[in-house]
Image (cartoon, rainbow, N blue to C red):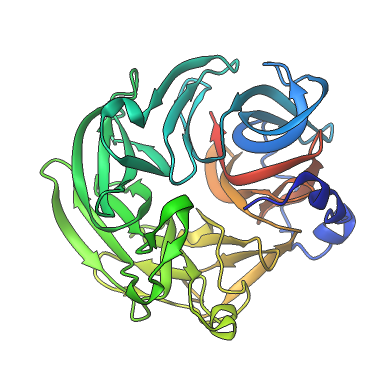
Amino acid sequence: MPLPIDQRRRHWLAAAAVMAGWPLGAAAQAGAAKPMAVAAAWRCAQTLSPQGEVLGDGPERDHVGILEPDWDDGRLLIRAAVPVPDRVHGLLADGSGGFFAVAYRPGRWLLHVGGRGEVLARHALADEGNRRTFNGHVTWTPDRRHLVTSETDAADSAGWISLRDPQTLRRVGEWPSGGIEPHDIRFDAAGRLWIANGGILRAALDRKRDLDRMQPSLVALDVASGAQIGRWELDDPRLSLRHLAIGHGSEPLVGVALQAEHDDPGRRAEAPLLAVCDGQRFVVPSRQAIGKGYSSDIAPGPVGGFFLASERSHHVLRWDPRRPETLQTVGELERAGALAPWRTEDDGRTSPDGVYIAAARGLARWHPSQPAKMLRWPIALAIDNHLVPLG
């Protein structure tokens, strides 16, 4: 949960201290980064125009919009801003410069925003005549003909995956998620849908209940038939499965960001941050207690590995499958939370090995062969959990 604006001001760090420990490769000047806009969600106490201009002070409220970093000039611009009724979670690029945004769990609405900040479509779950709520994530089917959302039926806590029309945002198909509280959802290159069932039962106002009955699971689904291809559980049922990333290796791994829900604070603080699945085994490769048992986000990293962020410990970490027991710290930023892949071109080849990082002070970037940099937010804002690059 983002801090209130006044607290965020007190928790900003000096940029020099934040970046001092970040490793740079010898080829730091190779493959200059091109400007890339990102979709984001934030809370601020300014009234913004649709083009992101500050019109004056206003009540604190949530927005979605487009941020445009200029790394050469050292500026970060708000290119578009759309006020929304409540907190946003997952974001998805639409392929045309715009994006989809889904409300935070228990979410009631889905929104499509164009590249100039124009609202192209809105959809409220109340219009579908059931007690479903969105669980905060949306993705494309591999053929990009439909959207897919994770949902919960409030009547019996059953998890569902819905197929949606990208024009109207209405449901056109559905499958059981194979578990409780499905959260993040991702397709791999083989067309399998991976589902992180968080496993937490929820009471009114999203309150967690009966944690001793948690049932987290990782499910692979064949969406052509709706059949489960596989289902995996970790030995510790108090490790909730939250966010997913598909690795870029020759045999891609599925990375799962974990959030501990143990009653004992000591056990929570010592809990691992990452689990990985190769389609056969589902394991926790590293037991390093760096993130206070809370991984905010995950993104694909170099050599088929992953980046992890922990806003509670203020760390950004890298997991390398060649050294599976080790988590390398690549940055320490106040409330480092949202991650997004940063792709650069080197000798005409696209490298997906970098990462954008949203933190309390601003937007940062890291890459093994590029200079690490950070840009301050243009206004006082509290950034939310996810970013998505807009190609």
Q: Residue at x 52, y 23 (%)?
A: 98
Pick whichever, 207 or 9, lies toward us.
207
Q: Position of residue 294 (x, y in %)?
A: 56, 67
- In this view, 343 is above or below 73: below
Q: Residue at x 35, y 31 (%)?
A: 125
Residue 225 image-quadrant placement? top left
- In this view, 118 is above or below 359: above
Q: Position of residue 100 (x, y in %)?
A: 46, 29
- Judge left or right: residue 344 versus residue 275: right
Q: Position of residue 60 (x, y in %)?
A: 73, 35
- Judge left or right: residue 18 versus residue 316: right
Q: Position of residue 119 (x, y in %)?
A: 52, 16
- Judge left or right: residue 357 versus residue 277: right
Pick whichever, 29 or 116, lies toward us.
116
Look at the image and tell me whether residue 346 can be seen.
no
Q: Residue at x 56, y 35 (%)?
A: 86
Looking at the image, the residue that sits furthest to the front is 204
Pick whichever, 380 or 200, lies toward us.
200
Q: Residue at x 89, y 56 (%)?
A: 16
- In this view, 372 is above or below 57: below
Look at the image and tell me whether residue 36 can be seen.
yes
Pick whichever, 390 or 109, lies toward us.
109
- Judge left or right: residue 132 versus residue 87: left
Number of numbered labels in the structure image: 0
Residue 368 image-quadrant placement? bottom right
